Amino acid sequence: MPIGYNLLRVTIDLEAIRDNYRFLCSRGTALIPVIKSDAYGHGLIPVAKALEECGADCFAVGTVGEAARLRQEAGREVRGTVLALLGPQSSEDCRIAVEENILPVTARLDQLRDLQEAARHAERPTPIALKFDTGMARLGFGPDDAGRVLEVLSQCPLLRPQWLLSHLATADDPGQADFTREQAARFRRVRDHFTAAWPGLRCSLVNSAGLLAFPDLTWDRQRPGIALYGANPFHSTELAHLGRDLRPAMRVQAPVLAVHPLAKGASISYGRTYVADQDKTVAVVAAGYADAFSRGLSNTGWILLRGQRAKILGRVCMQMTAVDVTHVPGVAPGDQAVLLGSDGEASITPEDLSSWWGTIPYEVFCLLGMNPREYVASTKTGQGESHHNR
């Protein structure tokens, strides 16, 4: 989105992401940080560089195109392995994966054959990852396909399987731990099929929640995503303490455009969905659904002004949202409202905002992160020194 298109601004604290990475590493495991979808809205290139400074040497992105962007734009600053989790979806993707030294995740037999052809054309061996479905039912070979995969690989002499992957479906739900262990057992059986042919094959199964709650399922490397950005995968469960040391890295602000009274009995915004039950003072904030601040927050969400929560009144509009500041003295045009993050002692966490929104922190990050971003050295107290604009 071009600078100037809107007034909402997103600030990313790279040190918080580094802290989260260090915390996850302290669980005694090696990591493959998941930075797909523009690092969950936090910025692919800045996040990758920040994590490599912390020692990360392997990254997981979404598409082959995103992996190529990381290779080309980060250059020598990101030298590690880059996995493309969605795998090649065309012959062009296969060519790019081979030429750009991208590790493609394969989940279909035709991908193996197409990658072999691209490797043959480039005259170079090509490392790959194999993905098996153990219970998510999205992408992946089935557990019973192991023999067929081995057969096709025997016909693809330039392919070098390096990783065996699967993905957990319910690791963040303490009530479904049995299914997580069932997936792990299926994964173990798949691995056993490949041990003889590829004894050096490394395994990765565990996501953020699995890393925190299932230390016995760590395998060779884990693939944390949401925890890197400071959202607790066990929020509001009995395992919430496992993620209490995570620090949110995204802060979202927008200026106040106007402050005015709203008389008892008067309505505000489209549809007259809010009518004042007493005399009010309202502030109009420059954030709306054009800025990915959801219309679903109408009459339900809150923002921070001068260190206090202010409730959203009426419908969220395209570029404006009205809030109740009757109890917040001194609010004036130009004040910065905090939509996500801290303001003094008060805060709106990713879990707070997503619950009012009716979604999950993943979506909140990905959508709000589409706005203009700047990067700071640290915002532990809600402040920081800006050093890099999007």
Image (cartoon, rainbow, N blue to C red):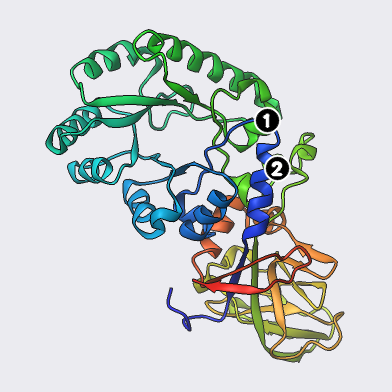
Drawn side of residue 353 relative to residue 2, left or right: right
Instruction: Point out the residue furthest to the left here.
Output: 121
For residue 335, the mark is none
Drawn side of residue 187 relative to residue 260, left or right: left
Residue 120 image point, x, y percent: 14, 32
Residue 368 image point, x, y percent: 55, 64
Between 286 and 56, the one nearer to me in the picture:
56
Hey, which quadrant is residue 117 in on the image? Answer: top left
Q: Is residue 167 above or below residue 233?
A: above
Mark-to-mark CA distance, 1 and 2 = 10 Å
Q: Quadrant of the N terminus?
A: bottom left
Identified by mark 2, the residue type is Phe
Identified by mark 1, the residue type is Gly
Residue 387 image point, x, y percent: 59, 73
Between 105 and 142, the one nearer to me in the picture:
105
Residue 349 image point, x, y percent: 72, 58
Q: Secondary structure at mark 2?
A: helix
In the image, what residue occupies the spot 52% across and 27% down?
205
Numbered-mark total: 2
Hey, which quadrant is residue 138 in on the image? Answer: top left
Between 245 and 361, the one nearer to me in the picture:
245
Q: Which residue is mark 1?
A: 28
Drawn side of residue 7 relative to residue 84, left or right: right
In the image, what residue occupies the spot 77% across and 46% down?
245
Q: Is residue 213 above or below residue 86?
A: above
For residue 23, the mark is 2
In the image, what residue occupies the spot 67% across and 25% down?
214
Between 102 and 38, the one nearer to me in the picture:
102
